[in-house]
Image: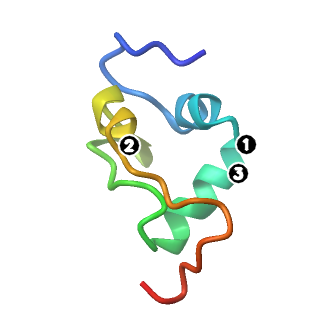
């Protein structure tokens, strides 16, 4: 389980929190359709988010058309 007290969450942490694979998070990020908030920080080429960013993010529901955004 991703630690909400951590300074930053990695792709693996976000995936764990949302119950999806790390590849799904990478896909969300690459599509750039509002399925994932922008990273709060980059560590080299690795994105990272503050836990509050992810916890406060309103995810698009499953089955929602994202091609209209």
**Which residue is found at the position 48% from the left and 89% from the top?**
68
Above or below residue 20? Residue 13 is: above
Sequence-wise, the earlier of marks 3 and 2 is 3
| Point 55% across, 28% down: residue | 13
Under circle 3, the secondary element is: helix
Real-space CA distance between mark 3 and mark 2, rounded to the nearest whole angstrom: 19 Å
Whether residue 18 sits left or right of residue 6 in the image: it is: right
Closer to viewer: mark 3 or mark 2: 3
Q: Earlier in the sequence, mark 1 or mark 2?
A: 1
Query: Is there a contact, CB below 8 Å, between mark 3 and mark 2?
Result: no
**Residue 60 location in percent, x, y?**
51, 61
Q: In the rendered structure, are the residues bearing label 1 and label 2 in contact, judged by CB atoms less than 8 Å apart?
A: no
Distance Cα–Cα, label 3 vs label 1: 5 Å
Structural crowding at the residue carrying mark 3, measured as other residues with C-alpha within 10 Å and reported as few (<14), some (14–19) or many (≥20): few
Instruction: Identify the element where label 1 is drawn.
Output: loop
| 41 lies left or right of 45 | left
Q: Quadrant of residue 62?
A: bottom right
Q: Are marks 3 and 1 in contact (CB under 8 Å)?
A: yes
Numbered label attached to residue 44: 2
Above/below status of 27 relative to 3: below
The disc at residue 29 is: none
- Pick the front one: 34 or 31: 34
Question: Which residue is the site of mark 3?
Answer: 23
The mark found on residue 21 in the picture is: 1
Q: Quadrant of residue 50?
A: top left
């Amino acid at each position: 389980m991703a630690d909400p007290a951590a300074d930053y969450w990695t792709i693996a942490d976000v995936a764990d929190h949302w119950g999806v694979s790390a590849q799904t998070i990478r896909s969300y990020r690459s599509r750039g359709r509002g399925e994932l908030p922008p990273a709060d920080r980059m560590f080299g080429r690795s994105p990272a988010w503050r836990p509050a960013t992810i916890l406060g993010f309103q995810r698009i529901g499953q089955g929602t058309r994202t091609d209209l955004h």
